[in-house]
Image (spheres, coloured by chain):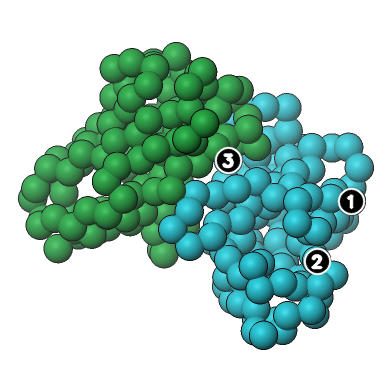
Amino acid sequence: AQSVTQLDSHVSVSEGTPVLLRCNYSSSYSPSLFWYVQHPNKGLQLLLKYTSAATLVKGINGFEAEFKKSETSFHLTKPSAHMSDAAEYFCVVTRSGGSYIPTFGRGTSLIVHP
Amino acid sequence: DAGVIQSPRHEVTEMGQEVTLRCKPISGHDYLFWYRQTMMRGLELLIYFNNNVPIDDSGMPEDRFSAKMPNASFSTLKIQPSEPRDSAVYFCASSLYLKVETQYFGPGTRLLVL
């Protein structure tokens, strides 16, 4: 069994300040973890993925995430927020090795103030 | 490439009516997925196809829902009869491989059942 919890439904930051979106997971087996972004009226786009290689994963648009097994966390960070980062972000877990059914978090809405 | 195409983008219907959602996957992709996104349940996988054959429909909520893929370039998700609780955004995604990180998502169809 697997589950994912995004700890904040909304995160509000000022442009130029750091971003932290929190995700905790639960999995009975070795997980693969992903972050997706969804801009208004658009489909989901893959930001980054962890698949049992390096624990610090770099993605597109300056985002990165760190896999911490001891804390069962996979938090998403960015050093400096940009207005274009305002969107919905989803943390996703699947079973490592290609087993299909993904479990999506409920999403975190990132609000960026000028 | 135009990406995954979904139609209609918005649908408003009355309870009891039949609703048909359409999806054109990216050419050459062997896998097609239907997801539903609601505030209550987040993003859920409904069904997926491989080479036009339904592989796993365990996420389909009930018999009122059906999905078909008559050829490699077209799929439908039908709800008959529709109910207000079916109101959601329905996403179609396609991919070359059976791995969530390789999926390309369409823009979604926003369905409102009155």
Mark 1 or 2, closer to the camera: 2
Q: Amino acid at mark 3?
A: Pro
Nearer to me, A112 or B102? A112
Q: Could you say which disc has been placed on residue B27 in the image?
A: none
Does residue A18 appear in this view? Answer: yes
Q: Earlier in the sequence, mark 2 or mark 3?
A: 2
Image position of B4 with respect to A86: above or below: above
Measured from the top left, where is residue A79 in percent x and y?
85, 70
- Quarter of the image containing the N terminus of chain A? top right
Nearer to me, B46 or B9? B9
Measured from the top left, where is residue A22 in percent x and y?
72, 66
Question: Hue of chain B?
Answer: green
| Chain under numbered label 1 | A
Cα gap from disc 3 to disc 1, whole angstroms: 21 Å
Cα gap from disc 2 to disc 3, whole angstroms: 25 Å
Q: Earlier in the sequence, mark 1 or mark 2?
A: 1
Judge from the rendering whether residue A73 lies leftward or rightward of residue A12; answer left or right.
right
- Residue in the image at 61% along x and 70% along y: A86
Q: Are marks 2 and 3 on the same chain?
A: yes
